[in-house]
Image: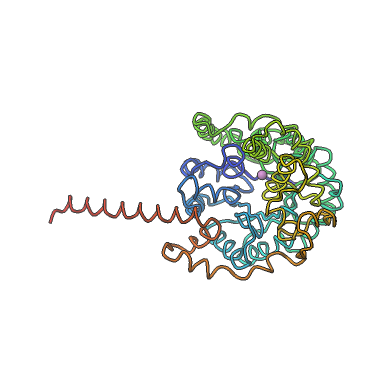
Amino acid sequence: MAKVKITETVLRDGHQSLIATRMRTDEMLSVIEKMDKVGYHSLEMWGGATFDACLRFLNEDPWERLRVIRAKVKNTKLQMLLRGQNILGYKNYSDDVVDEFVRLSIKNGIDIIRIFDALNDLRNIETAIKATKKYGGHAQGTVVYTISPVHNTEVYVNLAKKVQDMGADSLCIKDMSGILTPYYGYELIKELKKNIDIPIQLHTHCTSGMTDMTYLKAIEAGVDIIDTALSPFGLGTSQPPTEPIVATFKGTEFDTGLDMDLLCEIAEHFKGVKDKYMQNGILNPNVFNVDTKVLSYQVPGGMLSNLMSQLAQANALDKYNQVLLEVPKVREDLGFPPLVTPSSQFVGTQAVMNVVAGERYKMIPNEIKDYVRGKYGKPSVPISEDIKKKIIGDEEIITCRPADLIPPQLTSIKGEMKEYYEQEEDVLSYALFPQVALKFFKDRQAAKYKIDSELVDKEQKTYPV
Ligand code: CO
């Protein structure tokens, strides 16, 4: 048995899960060279919500974050998370935009791209996998884990085989809600190892309180790589903490080989960062509660708080338990989609509407209509005629890959933002988050003008004419 490899998530999922993705680049840079010396398999530090958060909340260029980290990380692979045809946004993009995004991610320093689709419709990850290979990156194909009467080991093994056949370099089992149990996790990894040859990485969250045990059993079953977050940004809704995992396997056949002294030094730094977000209120201590609702209702943590705020807006917080019971029913009606962005949002909204309106499917959000039309891809099981009729009447359903209906977009996007263009990466920032990027570009121009005029001032003072 080979030693277990570790992907460190403190720079992406760790802070995305605990402090709403607010960690700044300067809070990463002072320890990044130390992190490069630990012996990690990879550092997950980009993609997911970091791109949006950089532009929207931090006034940082996400591309610049990638470049400055790459410049300091010489030995360790840099990894990102990509939502297939959604890239890092919330809708499907044309193939030329996906291809260009992947090209520039790799050009600026990404080594490994983890690519997933919320519905496990593998047609939605095909373009991104091909592009990653084309530009010399490591394409990690992903199977999203969920629990339903139609999801079983056979389904997962078949999906994994298809991911391997698509040319992926490795497979990720992504358990975004932390519902994979230790013994089933063992069985699943054993079966996957029997059926595919590419390395298998397990990604999960501590939400339900079982995850350290799940990692232990998955490692005994032969999983190759696991995701952990340094202790200040581990546990709760994040990943298991890195240091105890490293200590657990030290001296065994699974020894991770990571430098424990360095890990402790780096953890000390991130403890300071965590304290700052604790003090300014961005870190809500509730994220560390063990959430057992996720086990009974399959509702991931982030979705619970969304449901609460929707109910509060409708002045119907007393209906919370009814909504929780409605979520699995809506999910069944819709063919058991895994609950991850974006399906978690629209299933939740429909459940709230069904309860608040007092009649099921009286009000229907557009996203649900598009989902039933097939615009997000194929559901895990076909939706019944009855439900289909209720939601979209006699409309036709799309059976092709949804992105086949989207003509190339890159040229027109370039045209729209050309007056702000400073680097080719700007086109992609604009493509994903037009309003947010535009504001960022304008601020950037204004700041530059200010710096320029300050320089002129200084020169005039130093060298008076
Ligand atoms: Co995650």
200 or 1: nearer the viewer: 200
Q: Is residue 215 left or right of residue 92?
A: right
Coloration of the structure image: rainbow
- The relative height of residue 158 versus residue 35 in the rendered view (above or below) is below
Residue at 60% x, 38% y: name it: 259
Residue 362 location in percent, x, y?
Answer: 74, 48
Split into 4 quadrants, where in the image is the N terminus? Answer: top right
Residue 183 location in percent, x, y?
Answer: 84, 38
Q: Is residue 32 left or right of residue 92?
A: left
204 or 401: nearer the viewer: 401
Q: Is residue 248 left or right of residue 12?
A: right
Residue 6 seen in the figure: no
151 or 190: nearer the viewer: 151
Q: Which of the 4 image quarters holds residue 185?
A: top right
Please identify the residue farthest to the left as the structure is shown. 465
209 or 31: nearer the viewer: 209
Split into 4 quadrants, where in the image is the C terminus? Answer: bottom left
Residue 355 location in percent, x, y?
Answer: 74, 40
Residue 239 location in percent, x, y?
Answer: 66, 38
Residue at 46% x, 64% y: name it: 417
Residue 124 seen in the figure: yes
